[in-house]
Amino acid sequence: MQVILKQNRAAVNAGKRFKEPAARKIGIFGSLFGCWHRRLSRPFTTDNETYQTCLECGARRRFDMGTFRSSGRFYYPPVARFGNY
C-alpha cells in the first residue's frame, strides 16, 4: 500500500497525472485470468478524482462519493518515470 501512495505522490509532483482514457486499461483476458480485485482500499481523492485501489495489483476504479459505489472499469495508473530509468 505504501508503494502505491508513493507512486501517487511522485506522479502528482512530476505533473504526469493522466485521467482514465490515457491509462492502461485491463482487457477481457486480464479480467478473466488476472487479479479479481476482491480486496479494495478505502476511497482516495486526488486532483478532484475519487477512486478505490486494488490492494493486490494496484488497479484503480472510479468511486462516486454521492452514491458510495464504484463505477466504470478497472484501469492501471501510468507509472511516473524520472531520469533515464
Image (cartoon, grey):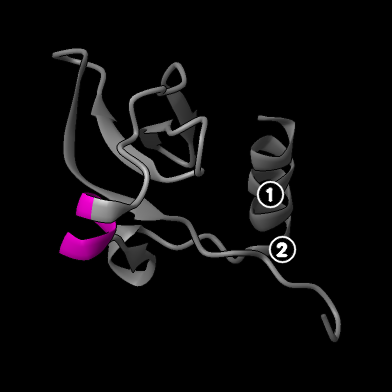
Identify which amino acid the numbered label 2 is placed on.
Ala
- Measured from the top left, where is residue 9 in percent x and y? 70, 44
Question: Which mark is drawn over residue 14?
Answer: 2
- Measured from the top left, where is residue 69 in percent x and y? 18, 19
Q: Nearer the viewer, residue 3 or 50?
A: 3
Main SS class of the magenta portion in the image: helix
How packed is label 1: few (under 14 Cα within 10 Å), some, or many (20 or more)? some
Q: Which residues are magenta?
A: 27-32
- Which quadrant would the C terminus be assigned to in this image? bottom right
- Which quadrant would the N terminus be assigned to in this image? top right
Horizontally, is 32 left or right of 61 in the view? Answer: left
Per the image, the residue denoted by label 1 is 7
Q: Nearer the viewer, residue 57 or 68?
A: 57
Marks 2 and 1, how far apart at CA? 11 Å
Horizontally, is 37 left or right of 55 in the view? Answer: left
Horizontally, is 42 left or right of 3 in the view? Answer: left
Identify the secondary structure beneath mark 2.
Answer: helix
Q: Nearer the viewer, residue 48 or 78?
A: 78
Question: Do labels 2 and 1 touch, CB within 8 Å?
Answer: no
Horizontally, is 28 left or right of 15 in the view? Answer: left
- Measured from the top left, where is residue 23 in percent x and y? 39, 65
Above or below: residue 64 compared with residue 8: above
How packed is label 2: few (under 14 Cα within 10 Å), some, or many (20 or more)? few
Identify which amino acid the numbered label 1 is placed on.
Gln
- Figure label count: 2
Q: Quadrant of residue 38?
A: top left
Residue shown at 21% from the left, 63% from the top: 29
Identify the secondary structure beneath mark 1.
Answer: helix
- Measured from the top left, where is residue 30 in percent x and y? 28, 59
